[in-house]
Image: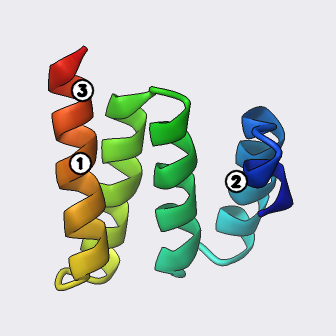
Amino acid sequence: MAYLHTKNYDEAIKYIDIAINLKPNDPTFYINKGNILDSMHKYDLAIEAYNQVLKLDPNNSDVLNNKGITLINKNDR
């Protein structure tokens, strides 16, 4: 996640997508992707990533929280 900390979001997404292709049932990668996309103000794509987490882990309260924040951010724009 070093790319996220340096705000190199495009590179971060590139490597997260590789990880998702290798382990498509690991919700952690989708959480990270959603967080990156939210940081990029790509709210609809972030919500899609969070929805994928919820398909894999419907009771993930962290993702429900992140999705709620993203929806608020989206509506504030």
Q: Residue at x 83, y 50 (%)?
A: 3
Q: Residue at x 71, y 58 (%)?
A: 16
Q: In the displayed structure, does residue 17 sit left or right of residue 70?
A: right
Q: From the viewer's perspective, is the residue at label 1 or at label 2 nearer? A: 1
Q: Residue at x 47, y 77 (%)?
A: 27
Question: Could you tell me residue 42's position as x and y percent?
Answer: 45, 27
Question: Could you tell me residue 21's position as x and y percent?
Answer: 69, 64
Crowding near pointer 3: few (<14 within 10 Å), some, many (20+)?
Answer: some
Quarter-of-image position of residue 66: bottom left
Name the amino acid, label 2. Answer: Asp
Q: Residue at x 31, y 45 (%)?
A: 47
Please, is residue 50 above or below residue 27 in the view? above
What residue is disc 1 on? Answer: 69
Badge 3 element: helix
Q: CA distance from mark 1 to mark 2?
A: 23 Å
Which comes sooner in the sequence, label 2 or label 3?
2
- Nearer to the camera, 50 or 36: 36
